[in-house]
Amino acid sequence: MKICVVGLGSIAKRHIKNIKKLYEDVEIDILRHGDKDEPEYGNNVYSYEDLADKYDAVFITNPTTMHIDTLNKLMGKADAFFIEKPLRPTDCREDSIDSLPGDKVFYVACPLRYTGIIKYLKQNIDWNRVYSLRAMSSSYLPEWRPGTDYTKCYSSRKDLGGGVAADLIHEWDYISYLIGKPDKVHTVRKKISELDIDVEDVALYIGEYKDKVVEVHLDYFGRKTLRDLYIFMQDDTVYCDLVNNTITYLKQDKVIEFGEERDDYQTAELRHFFDIASGKIDNDNSAYEAERLMRLLEN
C-alpha cells in the first residue's frame, strides 16, 4: 500500500503510527514544508512535483484553510481522500463540494463516532424517548500541545481556519450521527477570555428538532478538561463522560465502563476509511455531508 500524507502535525503523526500498526507493507510519502526531516514517519517530500503518480489514499492533514486547494492539486493522485475536519463554508464553497468527482471517495474525519460510548448510544438508546441532549467540550488551549506555542497553531489563528466552533466540531458531528441534523440552530460565538488568539474561544448552540432540543457548549478556556453528554429521557437521565470513558444511568445508578485509549478509536476509524476506499461499505461522512453541517452551524 502506498499512502501520501500532507502535513506532519500531531494528528498526522498519530495517523501514520496507526496506519503502520494496521498494515505492515505500507510506504508513506509526507508532503511538507518544514525544514526538519523526520524519516521515522515516512519519506519527506517538499514539492508536489516530487510525489508519486498514484497513491492508494491521500491524507489531508494540513491547516483547515488549505484543505480544498490541496485537494484540488492532488485530485489525480488517488481515488480515496481522508480529510481532517473541519470543512468550513469559507474554505469549501458550495461549488467546490458539488463539483467533486462522484467516482472518488472524500471522507472527512469524525473519530468520536468510533468510541465505545458513541457506538453504545447508537445501538442501545431509544431516541424516540429522548427529550433533550446537552453536550460540552471544555479545555485549556495552551495545554493542548505540550512543547509548542499555542498562539502559532491553527486553532488560534483565523488565517488558518481556527476557532473553537470549527475546531471542536466533534460534538455536533456525533450528535448529528446519533439523531440527525437540527432543523434550526441558535448560535453565540465570541472571544471573551484573555487567550492570545484572534478567533472565538467560546461557542454556544441551541439546536431545534421536531421532537427534542439540543444544547452544546464549546470553549478553549476551561482549566479542567471536560467532554460530556447528558441525555434526558422519559425514564432516566444518562450521563456520558468521554474523558473517563463511562456511561452512567443516573436514576438506575448503573455505570458502564469502556476501557479504551485514544488510538483504539482512531485506529477503528482508519479501518472504516480503508473499507470505504476499497468499496466494502458506503461513505458515511462525505465532504458534502461534513460541509453541510458546518454551513448549518455557521449561518
Image (cartoon, rainbow, N blue to C red):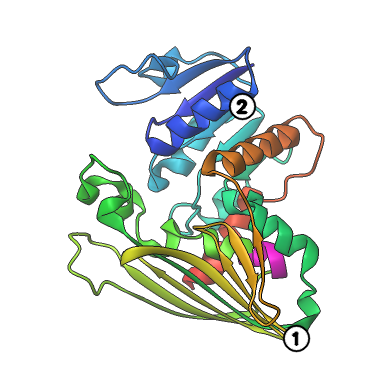
The N terminus, quarter of image: top right
Q: What SS does tag 1 mark?
A: loop
Q: Nearer the viewer, residue 236 or 47?
A: 236
Q: Residue 208: where, in percent of width, then height?
A: 62, 83
Question: Where residue 235 is drawn, which disc sits there?
Answer: 1
Mark 2, residue position: 57
Residue range in magenta is 175-179
229 magenta-colored: no
Q: Residue at x 72, y 59 (%)?
A: 120
Q: Where is residue 109? Give x, y as percent.
A: 57, 46
Q: Hey, what amino acid is under mark 2?
A: Ala
Q: N-terminal of the two: label 1 or label 2?
A: 2
Work out whether residue 298 can be spotted.
Answer: yes
- Judge left or right: residue 221 versus residue 81: left
Is label 1 in contact with label 2 (beta carbons under 8 Å)?
A: no
Find out whether residue 177 is within the magenta segment: yes
Quadrant housing residue 222? bottom left
Q: Position of residue 19 (x, y in %)?
A: 58, 26
Left or right of 68 on screen, residue 109 = right
Q: How many marks?
A: 2
Give the residue type that dot 1 points to: Asp
Residue at x-position 60% and y-position 20%: 55
Which numbered mark, 1 or 2, is in the foreground of this view? 1
- Name the residue: 72% across, 50% down: 284
| Marks 1/2: CA–CA distance | 46 Å
Q: Name the quadrant containing residue 12.
A: top left
Prevailing secondary structure class for the magenta stretch in the rendered image = helix
Residue 157 visible in the shown view: no
81 over 93 or under it: above or below: above
